Image (tube, helix red, strand yellow):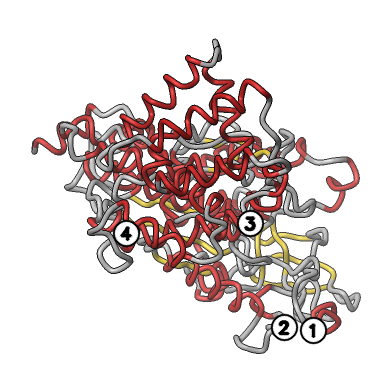
């Protein structure tokens, strides 16, 4: 056993805890299919979103952990698109909606692409999924439900569902309402006359012939094979059938799907298979603590997050406490970026066992890229405050200050820092600038600010962030701020026009002593604070 494997087997971070389930699953013998299969599911009736990213990112982390524990076992990750599902509702955000309405209930891969670019709407959304996953560098294999059904690769599993039909119905019917029970069948036949996926009662079953009889939309009785793409399963039996047919070993799901997972496990066992391992992650909440809903449009979208912060910070957010409900709104972004930078800065000093416990080990699969390390010690929060103090309209304004602070840094030598600068300017323009509210200082604060101005003016040119910070502390103490937090709060509100802010020593060093004195002068003028920074 290699040292790396031994450390992985003892690691406690949650992806290793999850991977340990798979180690136990194959402790006695290797999988007959020759590999351990991870799966994530995607419903291609819409575009990929935050949940899609989270599921693939977290599953990838478990996969990587398992690969360290059992390097002798190959692994695969299937990103499975349920693209044979019936097209139930025309989305609001697509062109040619009237045309789409004519194709309701057809398999998504039989609905014309409203954008006119792909073979079907399903193919269009599948392409979006692949482009989405590729943009993050995920290692996966795309799988299409339509392909598996129509190629016959699901045939044996579908015949097994037909054979165990009564047992599956006995599991499903108690979960349905009385009206739904009357017409329910695991099989959804595809109408030979209209091409639609039908929710109709099954009138007869012929297990030996592998067929079902149903009434088509034109009123004719039709006998059709359950194989070859002539039918599709309802989504809950379909999920279980897929686990059985593919031999899925691991798949996670949201907490809201726990009853469906439990149902799927029962059906897999009825089919003669083994349910996959996995866990149920908590859902995201908006800033009011309400569950995020695509239809409501509350909360933060993935596109919005990536407008203001790098994807690594989003991966960190997904890593942290996946079983705890987390608020997902704009104010969490700066903290996530700075937490990521902190983990990166400390990583190299850790021993190998400690490294495996940190989020960035799982984000980067144990190898931290050099290009995320060069940030000249600048935090995202500090960059945001620099953008605010400088009223930065673009990155070049920011780099004017940064070059003075860190003479060796430039967009070319520190590309990750340059990305952070761009994000900080955008975040400042969209969120901080519209909410800036300066206030005039109280008499106590005015006296302290005059003292601080004199102290800053008397600093040596070599004064560092720590010395400046200590001087700011001393000024607050001299002027009777028993709670020094109130002194710093005053600095943020009077000088920066916001309720929270940076470590002042670091800020002054970055922004410049003379520039900070100018901020104080503006605040001390009659009406100056309300006037802002120009």
- Residue at the spot of label 3: 534
Number of numbered discs on residues: 4
Front label number (3 vs 1): 3
Viewer-proximal residue among 280 and 505:
505
Name the image quarter holding residue 119.
Answer: bottom right
Q: For the residue labelled by badge 4, is the local secondary structure a helix, a strand or a loop?
A: helix
Q: Which mark, residue 60?
A: none
For residue 23, above or below residue 211: above
Disc 3 is placed on an element classified as: loop
- Which of the pair 423/359 is nearer the observer? 423
What residue would you read off at disc 2?
Answer: 114
Q: Decide: marks 4, 1 in contact (CB < 8 A)? A: no
Label 1, on which residue? 96
Does residue 160 appear anywhere in the picture? no
Instruction: Report, in whole angstroms, how far the alpha carbon at label 2 lies from the one at label 1.
Output: 5 Å
CA–CA distance between discs 4 and 3?
23 Å
In whole angstroms, how far apart are the C-alphas of marks 3 and 1? 48 Å
Q: Earlier in the sequence, mark 2 or mark 3?
A: 2
Give residue 403's mark: 4
Q: Earlier in the sequence, mark 3 or mark 1?
A: 1
Q: Is residue 503 above or below residue 36?
A: above
């Amino acid at each position: 056993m290699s040292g790396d494997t031994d450390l992985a087997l003892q690691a406690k971070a949650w992806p290793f805890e999850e991977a340990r389930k798979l180690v136990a699953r194959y402790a006695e013998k290797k999988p007959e299919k020759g590999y351990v299969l991870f799966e994530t599911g995607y419903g291609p009736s819409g575009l990929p979103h935050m949940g899609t990213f989270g599921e693939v990112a977290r599953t990838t982390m478990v996969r990587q952990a398992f690969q360290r524990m059992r390097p002798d076992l190959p692994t695969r990750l299937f990103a499975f698109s349920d693209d044979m599902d019936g097209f139930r509702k025309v989305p609001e955000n697509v062109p040619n909606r009237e045309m789409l309405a004519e194709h309701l209930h057809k398999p998504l891969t039989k609905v014309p692409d409203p954008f006119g670019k792909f073979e079907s709407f399903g193919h269009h959304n599948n392409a979006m999924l692949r482009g989405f996953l590729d943009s993050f560098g995920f290692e996966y294999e795309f799988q299409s439900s339509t392909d598996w059904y129509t190629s016959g690769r699901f045939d044996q599993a579908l015949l097994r569902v037909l054979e165990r039909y009564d047992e599956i119905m006995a599991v499903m019917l108690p979960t349905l309402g009385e009206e739904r029970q009357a017409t329910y069948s695991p099989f959804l036949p595809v109408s030979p006359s209209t091409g639609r996926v039908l929710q109709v009662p099954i009138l007869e079953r012929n297990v030996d012939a592998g067929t079902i009889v149903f009434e088509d939309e034109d009123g004719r009785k039709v006998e059709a094979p359950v194989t070859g793409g002539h039918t599709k399963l309802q989504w809950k039996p379909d999920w279980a059938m897929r686990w059985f047919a593919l031999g899925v070993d691991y798949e996670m799901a949201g907490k809201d799907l726990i009853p469906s997972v439990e149902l799927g496990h029962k059906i897999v066992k009825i089919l003669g298979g083994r349910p996959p391992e996995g866990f149920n992650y908590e859902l995201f909440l908006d800033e009011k603590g309400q569950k995020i809903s695509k239809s409501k449009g509350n909360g933060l979208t993935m596109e919005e997050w990536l407008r203001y912060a790098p994807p690594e910070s989003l991966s960190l957010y997904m890593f942290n406490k996946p079983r705890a409900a987390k608020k997902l709104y704009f104010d969490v972004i700066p903290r996530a970026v700075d937490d990521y930078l902190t983990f990166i800065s400390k990583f190299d000093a850790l021993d190998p066992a400690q490294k495996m416990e940190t989020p960035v080990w799982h984000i980067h699969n144990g190898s931290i890229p050099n290009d995320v390390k060069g940030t000249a010690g600048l935090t995202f929060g500090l960059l945001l405050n620099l953008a605010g103090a400088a009223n930065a309209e673009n990155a070049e304004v920011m780099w004017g200050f940064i070059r003075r602070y860190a003479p060796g840094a430039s967009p070319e030598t520190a590309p990750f820092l340059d990305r952070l600068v761009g994000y900080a300017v955008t975040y400042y323009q969209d969120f901080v600038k519209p909410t800036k509210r300066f206030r005039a200082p109280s008499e106590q604060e005015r006296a302290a600010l005059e003292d601080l101005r004199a102290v800053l003016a008397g600093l040596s040119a070599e004064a560092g962030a720590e010395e400046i910070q200590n001087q700011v502390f001393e000024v607050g103490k001299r002027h009777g701020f028993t709670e020094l937090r109130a002194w710093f709060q005053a600095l943020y509100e009077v000088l920066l026009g916001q309720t929270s802010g940076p470590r002042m020593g670091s800020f002054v060093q970055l922004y410049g002593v003379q520039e900070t004195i100018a901020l104080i002068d503006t605040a001390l003028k009659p009406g100056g604070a309300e006037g802002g920074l120009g």
